Amino acid sequence: TSYSKPDAAMTISAALDIDTATYCKIEKGEGKPKARGEQVEIIAQVLDTDKNEFVTLWLADKVYDVVGDEINAKIYSML
């Protein structure tokens, strides 16, 4: 299924049972709302995309949230 960006945001937010503005913040990584694992699976299903790929990217983002500052500090100390 092919969606325009506004249609996709509305469809996904409806599937997640959240408002479109909240979904858009999650999509852009703005503020506190973060997608939960079950939401990532729903998004993949709505977009007819490989669920495992989405979950892998979501998990990588979660790991980076935990260790990202440490990695950045090491990189900057090497410069």
Image: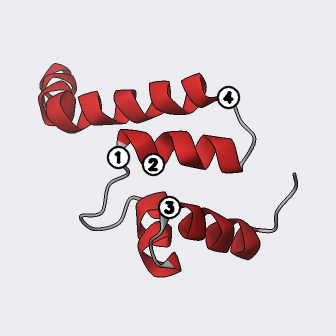
Q: Earlier in the sequence, mark 2 or mark 3?
A: 3
Q: Which residue is mark 3?
A: 16
Q: Residue at x 67, y 68 (%)?
A: 11
**Within 10 Å of the Cα at label 1, are there few (<14), some (14-19), or many (20+) other Cα atoms?**
few
Helix, strand or loop at label 1? It is loop
Which amino acid lies under the numbered mark 4 shown in the image of this protein? Asp
Helix, strand or loop at label 2? It is helix
Q: Quadrant of residue 29?
A: bottom left
Eyeballing the image, is 70 above or below 11? above
Q: Which mark is residue 39?
A: 2
Mark 1 vs mark 2, CA separation in Å: 5 Å
Q: Earlier in the sequence, mark 3 or mark 1?
A: 3
Mark 4 vs mark 2, CA separation in Å: 14 Å
Q: Which mark is residue 50?
A: 4
Eyeballing the image, is 60 above or below 35? above
Mark 4 vs mark 3, CA separation in Å: 18 Å
Q: Do tag 1 and tag 2 residues touch (Cβ < 8 Å)?
A: yes
Q: Which mark is residue 62?
A: none
Q: Residue at x 22, y 24 (%)?
A: 75
**Within 10 Å of the Cα at label 4, are there few (<14), some (14-19), or many (20+) other Cα atoms?**
few
